[in-house]
Amino acid sequence: MASVAERLQVSPFMTFFVIVSMQIGVGVLGFQRVIAKTAGHDAWISVLLAGASSHLILIVLYWLLQQADGDFLLLHQRLFGRWVGGALSSLLALYFAAMAFVVLRTYIEVIQVWMFPDLKTWEFSLAFLFLCLYITVGGFRVVVGICFFCLIIPSYLLFTFWFVLDYTDFYQLLPILDHPPSTIVKAAKQMTLTMLGYETILLFYPFIKRGNQSAKWAHAALLTTTLFYALLTVLTLAYFSEKQLQRQIWPTLTMWKIVELPFIERFEYIGIANWLLIILPNVCLGLWCSSRICKQLFPVRQKTALLVIAAICFFSTLLIHDRKEVDFVNTILNRVGFYFLYIWIPCLAGITYIVKKVRGNV
Amino acid sequence: MTAPPPSVWATLQTLGSSMDFQTKVYRNDTSGLYLWVSYIKPMVDIETVARSIFPYLFHRPFSSLEDIRQALPIDDAYISSDPNDVKAKLLEGYLFVRLHETDETGLLIKAQKTLERTLTIPEVEFSVVGPKESFIESLETNLYLLRKRIPIDRLTVKMTRVGTLSKTKVAVVYIDGIANPDNVQTVLQRIEQVEFDEMIDSSYIVQIISDNRHSPFPQLLDTEHPDRVAAVLAEGKVAIIVDGSPHVLIGPTTLVEFFSSFEDYFLNWTIASFFRLIRLFSVTFSILITPIYVATLNYHYELIPKDLLGTLITSRREIPFPPILEVLFLELTIELLREAGARLPTKVGQTIGIVGGIVIGTASVEAGLTSNVLLILVALAALASFTTPVYKIGNTIRLMRFPFILFAEMWGLLGVAFCFCIVMTHLLYLTSLGRPFLAPLYPPRWRDLKDAFIRLPFTSQSKRPETLRTEQPIRFNRKKAKEKRDIDE
């Protein structure tokens, strides 16, 4: 097992915060349109389906981690040898870096569309990545601290959906199961980008005290996000008519527009500013995971790896110019995430199982 | 070349270059022997010397220094020939008595003068109810104040001297068996390693031994309340007392502790909790209100409802400056007033406060330099920042506002959120004596929340804070403290 000093570890309970804060990201602002396009007013079932499947995948992830004594990269190496295994692990590093970059770029787009049309991408991207470097250099404990606060503090936003309730019509959800199962499953597949994030457990598992106890917290985290997404979907479907929803890129933000307090109008400004806190753990943990893999694979210091990855992320954000391209990278990441979690992980589990049967150990 | 071994004679010669060092020759009336008595005049209590030392020196028969020592009613008297010791003791206010002028051996007699102010009421941390004693500049008196409150043998005092010139006595106080030995060790070790010449005050020590010396956040709590120190010692913390400083340091500490006044414990828990929440709210308000003003007026005026926007626009119609300049102008004025008020004598300070606050404020609004809405906000923010019970964290809050204002000017609300994240990260990095500074929030210690944002009643405070990792986590038996009664009993 990759030995991690105890003073660097966090309690199993923190797994909950890491996973929830990692799962909730930019996806929340606009996932409803995509799934509603496919599954219509049955989209909420897709959300539940995606949630249920992620629970299954999580069980497999934990099983794999146990086979490899907590070190996922070691599993790659033992099964496929040094070179192939290493190559697979580097792909994983690339994936996490891409995740950080896509989340950041999508958020910048949201800001540019809703708040500051003149905001320079490089300006904000640079500042944000510097903040992320500052956090990530502090090590996993600081990253988890950010995950914790960035989940607790913006949680007040949940209350804002109370205002939306007045304008909802839940009869729009009827009839239930109006769509063929295949479309519902297809929508569930589209839901994966929003559900992504829990695969980081593969990397931060060694940093949890008594790692095997974290499983229940990880599942609790998945359950929480699934319920949150399902409720949000139900609310969105009841708030917008189906056609109206298709014209909203970010339904969540549009829903905030209805919130009105005696001293605040146009609540979405506050929502977007607050969303910075939600994005932060996503990018930080992405960078951390990616640099951690580099540290284990190559003879580099994690700090160096981190700097290089952040620089790559920075330049990548500059390459993306408009809505179409943002959508494109999101779709790609969605697909990669889906293949990784739902194709590669079960395959890997199968291979591990066979190897274990043949060799006696992995 | 080796230096010649220092002799007592040479030492006395060095001291003799100062005018206040005196050596006098007296003759004993009974035995006829001569005595050379040396001392540093300002350090010696003449009264003690005249009343209880000289009669024994001049009017009693003796043949050696040992005879004198035994006859003297003063217990701190001994024969020494160590030049360094003689020098140190003379500087502290001892008499040095020799039988011959060139003798290398002599008798050191304690005749120290002690001048200290009497105990007064706390001036920085004022509290309406509760004990009114406060620490003073004398280490012995301060220790007395603590011992009086914790009369147990396990109250341990470790003493060291710090400062190559000042040789200041520094005492580390803790309750053995409660305080975590690691914490004690950390404090002792850090004080040992202090390299400094003139240690004036405990605030020097804070700046030298803090975990992060560059952070604007104080990482050790300083207080002038002996009752507060006694209470936290009982919780398992460590106190550092510096001779000559009326402020005692407490560690390890956490951020929330800086916002809890010790008066909270003297009030009923419901009221105390309410006050604590008010304080936390006012601190947040104080930091964020002017940045939010800048952000909304610069970028997000759509945020403000129509009716309120009308009021704001009316008040800003005549103002020739952008919001940022307006805010900086007023904030700096307030800082100026505060600084002037702190430097001036009390009576003049009050006048300045009134003149500054009312005259400048009203005049600047009438002259059309600032809007009156902003004037209200800035004044409220200043007022809110005064609610911090610990002076030093108040200063931090004064400073924190400015980066927030600058970020708000740059990116509006997004900038405020961004700056907030930077501060949060900084706080996550901070530790106090190696313990996390943000505890009990992060790492979460749910049980410690009983005394963080709110203060629960004493019956539910039966356990010591988890973050301190005390040796004895139970404070008192909770079951005995809790009364259980059925209806109509």
Image (cartoon, coloured by chain):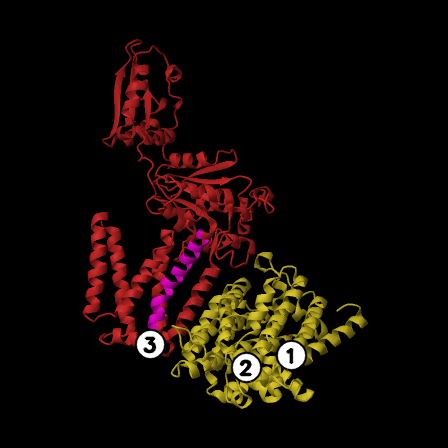
Chain colours: A yellow, B red
Judge by depth and name the residue closer to the eye, A28 or A316.
A28
Q: Find the distance from the CA under tag 3 to the CA under tag 1.
A: 46 Å
Query: Are tags 3 and 1 found on a single chain?
Result: no
Residue B314 location, x and y as percent? 26, 75
Left of A96 or right of it: where is B63? left
Which of disc 2 and disc 1 is earlier in sequence?
A: 1
Three-letter code for the amino acid on which mark 2 is drawn: Thr
Q: Which quadrant of the figure contains the N terminus of chain A?
A: bottom right
Residues rendered magenta in the picture = B271-294
Report which residue position mark 1 lands on.
A50
Report the magenta stretch's main SS.
Answer: helix
Report which residue position mark 2 lands on.
A236
Report which residue position mark 3 lands on.
B307
Residue A64 seen in this snapshot: yes
Q: Secondary structure at mark 2?
A: helix
Query: Is B89 located above or below residue A137 in the figure?
Result: above
Residue B365 location, x and y as percent? 22, 68
Disc 3 residue crowd, few under 14, some 14–19, many 20+, Cα 10 Å? few
Three-letter code for the amino acid on which mark 1 is drawn: Ala
Find out whether the residues at labels 1 and 2 contact each other: C-beta distance under 8 Å: no
Q: Residue at x 38, y 72 (%)?
A: A263
